[in-house]
Image (cartoon, rainbow, N blue to C red):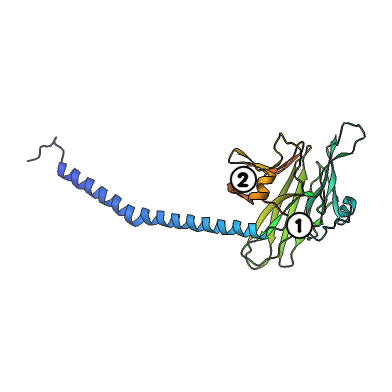
């Protein structure tokens, strides 16, 4: 006989048993399938990302194959080979090539090549074609869709012929397949360019494109003693990575699959870098003969 103030252990036990059975049923029939589906989705997305990044590595244009590479041309002649957007600020001068949307003509107005007051100003970027070639290019590569994307020979239309800290420039190119590629280029009061990439698809089929950016430098490895690092470098997951020219030449590409931060090339005095926004990026340092 159960007294009124005594607990009903039988009912408590049955309630616990039913609760445990419900939890086990939930784990087996709901939670476990959900976790399997999430794991499968994550694996598929990772495989897709690896496939796309491999596709980028295989499709990146090789600057050494540019048509304008002609050792008989002077720097001035190579600059004149493309319509240009003039760069004007208190610290920078030069131009951006509308052919290929290349940053390949940049000089530093406040720095001279030596201590003489009339010494030539420092030229940082120069068009591809001889030992001084040094430039940056931003663009897109086609993903799995058969779509024409801009390359180093694309002639972009500009809404202005001058870039200043107060006045950005918009570049536009239509590929003839209902897709328009847009670049908005801005310059701050110091030395930083900002590039905003957009794609407009007015066609009936979906498209897949992938953005890229690279810095290319033609450089003879110095024979002199070097006490500071000169060459490729970057901040990868909050750690500085420095890659020597000789090591890159002898060992081949240095690849960071899940990089964050900035990446570039430095020498004794000057430095150029790419600073992609947000998330992880595949970064490859390569040597071309």
| C-alpha span from label 1 to label 2 | 30 Å
Instruction: Evaluate whether residue 47 shows in this view.
Output: yes
- Quarter of the view holding residue 156: bottom right
Question: Secondary structure beneath disc 2?
Answer: loop
Closer to the camera in the image, 234 or 49 = 234
Residue at 71% over, 55% down: 139
- Judge left or right: residue 198 versus residue 105: left
- Quarter of the view holding residue 72: bottom right
Residue at 57% over, 59% down: 51
Location of residue 270 in the rendering, given as x and y in whole percent from the top left corner = 76, 38
Decide: few, some or many residues near mark 1? Use Cα within 10 Å; few <14, some 14-19, many ≥20: some
Question: Secondary structure beneath disc 1?
Answer: helix
Location of residue 104 in the rendering, given as x and y in whole percent from the top left corner = 80, 49
Q: Is residue 144 above or below residue 270?
A: below
Instruction: Evaluate whether residue 274 shows in this view.
Output: no
- Judge left or right: residue 184 versus residue 240: right
Q: Nearer the viewer, mark 1 or mark 2?
A: 1
Location of residue 229 in the rendering, given as x and y in whole percent from the top left corner = 69, 37
Of the 4 image quadrants, the one containing the C terminus is bottom right
Decide: few, some or many residues near mark 2? Use Cα within 10 Å; few <14, some 14-19, many ≥20: few
- Judge left or right: residue 31 versus residue 250: left
Location of residue 84 in the rendering, given as x and y in whole percent from the top left corner = 85, 53
Of the 4 image quadrants, the one containing the N terminus is top left
**On the image, numbered disc 2 is attached to which residue?**
278
Q: Earlier in the sequence, mark 1 or mark 2?
A: 1
* Residue farthest to the right, as pictured: 118
**On the image, numbered disc 1 is attached to which residue?**
64
**Looking at the image, do the residues carrying marks 1 and 2 touch, with CB atoms under 8 Å apart?**
no
């Amino acid at each position: 006989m159960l007294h009124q103030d005594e607990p009903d252990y039988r009912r408590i036990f049955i309630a616990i048993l039913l609760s445990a059975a419900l939890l086990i049923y939930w784990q087996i029939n709901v939670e476990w399938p959900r976790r399997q589906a999430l794991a499968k989705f994550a694996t598929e997305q990772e495989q897709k990302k690896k496939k796309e990044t491999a596709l980028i590595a295989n499709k990146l244009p090789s600057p050494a194959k540019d048509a304008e590479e002609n050792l008989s041309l002077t720097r001035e002649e190579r600059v004149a080979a493309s319509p240009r957007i003039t760069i004007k600020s208190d610290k920078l001068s030069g131009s951006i090539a509308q052919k290929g949307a290349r940053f390949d003509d940049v000089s530093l107005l406040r720095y001279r090549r030596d201590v003489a007051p009339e010494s030539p100003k420092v030229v940082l970027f120069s068009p591809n074609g001889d030992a001084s070639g040094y430039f940056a290019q931003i663009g897109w590569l086609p993903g799995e869709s058969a779509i024409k994307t801009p390359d180093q020979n694309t002639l972009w239309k500009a809404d202005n012929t001058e870039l200043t800290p107060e006045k950005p420039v918009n570049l536009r190119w239509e590929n003839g397949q209902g897709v328009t590629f847009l670049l908005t280029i801005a310059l701050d009061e110091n030395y930083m360019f900002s590039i905003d990439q957009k794609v407009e698809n007015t066609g009936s089929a979906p498209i897949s494109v992938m953005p890229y950016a690279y810095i290319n430098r033609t450089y003879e490895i110095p024979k002199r003693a070097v006490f500071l690092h000169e060459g490729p470098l970057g901040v990868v997951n909050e750690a500085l990575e420095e890659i020597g020219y000789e090591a890159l030449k002898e060992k081949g590409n240095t690849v960071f699959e899940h990089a964050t931060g900035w990446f570039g090339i430095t020498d004794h005095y000057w430095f150029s870098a790419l600073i992609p926004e947000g998330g992880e990026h595949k970064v490859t340092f390569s040597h071309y003969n």
